[in-house]
Image: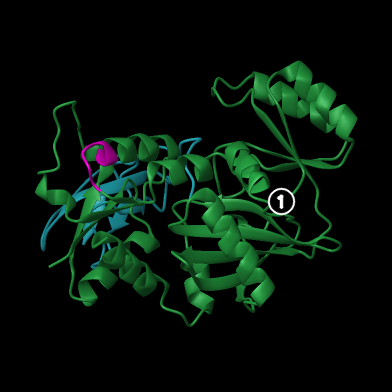
Amino acid sequence: MKKECKDCGAELTIPQDSMVGEIITCPDCGTDFEIVSKNEDSVEMKEAESVGEDWGQ
Amino acid sequence: MIRICVIYDKLRFEEKKIFSNIREKGFDATLVDGKSLTFDTESTKSDSRFGDIILQRMISYNRGLHLTYCLEHIGLPVVNSFNVSEICGNKLITSLVLKNNNVPTPKTTFAFSTESARECMKKLGYPLVVKPIIGSWGRGVYQIKDQSMAEMLLDSRQDNDNSFSRIYYFQELIDRPSRDIRCIVIGDQIAASVYRYSSDNEWRTNVAVGGRTEEAPLTSELQEIVLKASNAVGGGILGVDLMEDKERGYLVHEVNNTVEFRGASAVCKSDIAGAMTDYLVKMSTK
């Protein structure tokens, strides 16, 4: 599935097996998008949170 | 049927792997975005999304900790618990808990202002290692080699509004091979043990900064110290990181609360996600 990057207009490829919550990174501008909903023929994304200082494992 | 809820805020390899494993084993699994949740003082256990047990896998330490408190408040079992999460997410607390429980750990010094940090570094001498008390993947971990680097650190920390930036964590630099050891502990079992080698021109061994992994033999000595460290912080699903000091042997320097295991799963035969599912099932019936 293809989407357009909201920041730079580049084409984003959404892998078939991607899931809600996964992050898709624009190959051109590096913006991260989070998949918020997905079905067979559509996918909705929003800009992902930036990495927080308290992020970790 | 046992229902297991995996809470995330950023879906990684690990959450997908655990989620699919729970389903493959025939249990009911839900994936819940923790960022979408709300709680209030009247919240109750009846929310069906949460199932019988929760695996808390949030990448944000503070968000995960507070959400875990809410979930435990309404009576839900959470792996890892609030107490374990609080200890493991904060390196200062981890170091002190390890020391209190006689787990060998590097000598570490804490300071709480720019002035006392400067004095500390002068007294300790160089090189030494500085780490942020919260955070992972080697971010903000530096070797301070001399006084000029020490001043650069103090300057950068002063410019940072983060409430933890004025808490300093200085650790002795360990004389070790160019690797550390990551053990994945699940309950009282060690599911995997790997060496993490630092990449060229990099002293940190984190996979996130290019480190490569290789299966490490699980000796009885390693097993004993890893389980001791896990028990010291309260147990659960944990990643215990150790260094091999050339004189003192194993030293535990970190215990991770939402352990990543992509690197380990690529080189170990053991079914890490499967062992996690088995543990969650066992804990849900306790």
Taking the magenta stretch, the answer to whether it contains residue A33 is no
Secondary structure under badge 1?
A: loop
The chain identifier of the residue carrying mark 1 reads B
> What is the span of residues highlighted in magenta in the rendered image?
B71-76
Left or right placement of residue A3 versus residue B85 in this view: left
Answer whether residue A7 is visible to the viewer in this image: no
Residue B115 seen in the current view: yes
The amino acid beneath tag 1 is Thr
Q: The N terminus of chain A is located in which quarter?
A: bottom left
**Residue B61 placement, left or right of B274:** right
Colour scheme of this structure image? by chain
Q: Position of residue B113 (x, y in %)?
A: 70, 18
Q: Which residue is pictured at 61% across the width and 71% down the height?
A: B223
Q: Position of residue B78 (x, y in %)?
A: 31, 50
- The green one among the chains is B
Residue B84, given in percent of the width and then of the height, sits at 46, 46
- A18, above or below B108, in the image: below
On the image, the x and y values in percent for residue B206 come to 61, 57
In front of the other: B14 or B248: B248
The one of B135 and B188 positioned closer to us in this rendering: B188
